Every structure is written in structure tokens, then in C-alpha cells.
Image (spheres, rainbow, N blue to C red):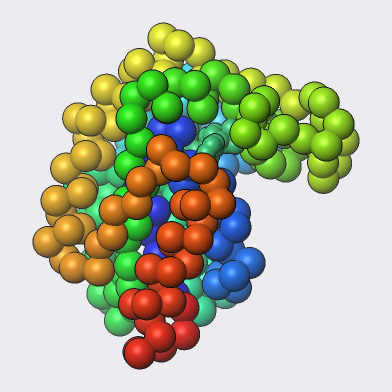
Amino acid sequence: MRLILLGPPGAGKGTLADRLTDRLSVPHLASGDILRAQIRQGSDLGPAVQKYMNSGQLVPDDLIVQVMISRLTQPDCAAGFILDGFPRTLPQAQALNGRLAEVQAPIDMVIYLDAGEQVIISRLAGRRVCPLCDATYHLQTMPPAESGKCDRDGADLQARPDDQPQVIRTRLQEYRRLTEPLLEYYAAAGRFVRLDGNKDIEWVYCQAQQVLTKTFSSTDEP
Ligand code: AP5
Ligand code: MG
């Protein structure tokens, strides 16, 4: 199963992908998490990438395409993957398509998680993340078992640096300008489904499961 999750910042792409990754037994490839890991590990790319991310701008296409295509060619992706946050420009989508065509492994489904601006703002304002493992929580909708601590490793939870109100505005502008055109691109390609990301986490997960089961039960396993 090769799945793309598309949607604005805070729509719940990462949250949904975390749940689907177990169900589908394929890795969750979140471009933002991969870039944040490069920063944490002090890689050469780190400082340049951090500047873009902290300002809410997209990193250059060439850079992210190289990072993501190299990730996709690792053995754990042989049976598929869930892409979260990539592609998010037309050149990225075209580069991904080209690569997948070469290996005759096209995208099976694109799920677009739609969410309104007020929902996005309250999701990002309440989001807390683990600086060690990237686990994601929300102060109201998904609190950790112990306040302020990661359930997995006990680290102190933090707000993401790009979840400041001014940076959120830039991220939303970037989304509308550069990523929204992908909706038409993938809708035209077929197997494109919109889900209402304003709804609660359980609802979104159940709908996604239903869509995947319905689409693939008559062809292959989701
Ligand atoms: P990235 O990390 O991908 O950020 P994003 O796309 O802006 O999306 P978010 O991670 O903010 O939101 P999400 O949809 O995953 O929501 P989540 O599940 O966390 O990218 C960061 C930066 O990296 C970019 O700005 C750019 O600089 C760079 N970058 C990354 N990819 C790139 C690319 N391809 N090209 C160029 N640059 C790139 O949920 C949000 C909150 O809401 C959480 O607290 C969660 O608990 C809660 N929640 C989730 N779903 C629900 C629900 N249904 N109901 C209630 N609460 C919910
Ligand atoms: Mg995310």
C-alpha cells in the first residue's frame, strides 16, 4: 500500500498516519520528522533546514526530493509506505511520480484531510511534542498520561518552534500557494478521497479505514 496524506498544517496527517502505520504494516514517512531528525543529529543540512522550518517556509524542492527519494528506496518501504508532508509542491509530486514509475510502483491512494482555519489554529496552539521521539499530543484532545511528559520515554514535552502564531500564518500561506494545487493534480489522477479533518480523531481514523477497505477489498489487501 502506497498512500499519500495531504492537508494543511495541523489537519491531523501525522496523527492519522501514526494509527494507520500499524494497521497497514508499512512505515510512516513524515518529511517534517525526517528534517527535524537531521537537525537533532547535527547533520550538515541541519542549520539551513532549521532556518526554513522555523520561519514557516518550505525547504527547497531539490533538497527534500533527494532526502525523501533516498528514504523511499530503503528496504522497509518495499511493501509500501505512508507519506505525510511529502510531496507538497508540483515539482515534488512530479519527481515522486517519476521515481515510482521507474520502479513500477505507483501511488495507490491519496487521502486529503481538510480542516478549517480556526480548527488548525487551536490544534497547533495546543500541540505538544516529544523532542526525543516526535510523539505528538494535544493539551485537550490527546493529553499524555502524565502532564507534560512523553508516554513513551518520559521526556519533557514542548511546543514546536513553528507553532507560534506568526509562523502558523506563513505556513498556511505556503500551503495555499504551493500545496493546494496538488489537490487538483491528484484528484485528476484518481483514487483521491477527501475526509473531514475537523472531526475527532476516532471518526477520522474510522473513515480512513473504511475508505481503504472499500477501495482495496476487491483488488488487493490494504
Ligand atoms: P511538517 O512537520 O510536515 O508540518 P505540517 O505539514 O505543517 O503539518 P503538521 O505536522 O503541523 O500537522 P499534522 O497535519 O501532521 O497534524 P498533527 O497530526 O500533528 O513540516 C514542517 C516544516 O518542514 C514545513 O513547514 C517545511 O519547512 C518543512 N517541510 C516538511 N516537508 C516538506 C516538503 N515536502 N517540502 C518542503 N518543506 C517541507 O495534529 C496537530 C495537533 O492536533 C496535534 O496536537 C494532535 O494531537 C491534534 N489532532 C490531530 N488530529 C486531531 C483530530 N482529528 N481531532 C482533534 N485533535 C487532533
Ligand atoms: Mg505532522
Instruction: Report the residue at 41% width, 9% height from top.
Output: 166
Residue 170, placed above or below residue 200: above
The answer to whether residue 202 is left or right of residue 177 is right
Percent x, y of residue 67: 46, 50
x and y percent of residue 16 in the render?
Answer: 52, 52
Is 69 on the left or on the right of 17, as rendered? left
Q: Residue at x 40, y 85 (%)?
A: 217
Of residues 12 and 175, which is closer to you in this image?
12
Name the image quarter holding residue 180: top left
Q: Residue furthest top?
A: 166
Give the quadrant of the N terminus.
Answer: bottom left
In this view, the residue in front, 26 or 207, is 207
Figure disc tally: 0
Visible residue check, residue 120: yes
**Residue 219, picture quadrant:** bottom left
Q: Position of residue 129 (x, y in %)?
A: 67, 31
User: Which residue is found at the position 33% from the left and 30% from the top?
Assistant: 116
Is residue 13 shown above or below 26? above
Q: Is residue 184 left or right of residue 75?
A: left
Residue drawn at x 45%, y 11% is 165
Nearest the eye: 104 or 23? 23
Q: Is residue 69 above or below residue 170?
A: below
Residue 151 image offset from top left, x and y in percent: 82, 41
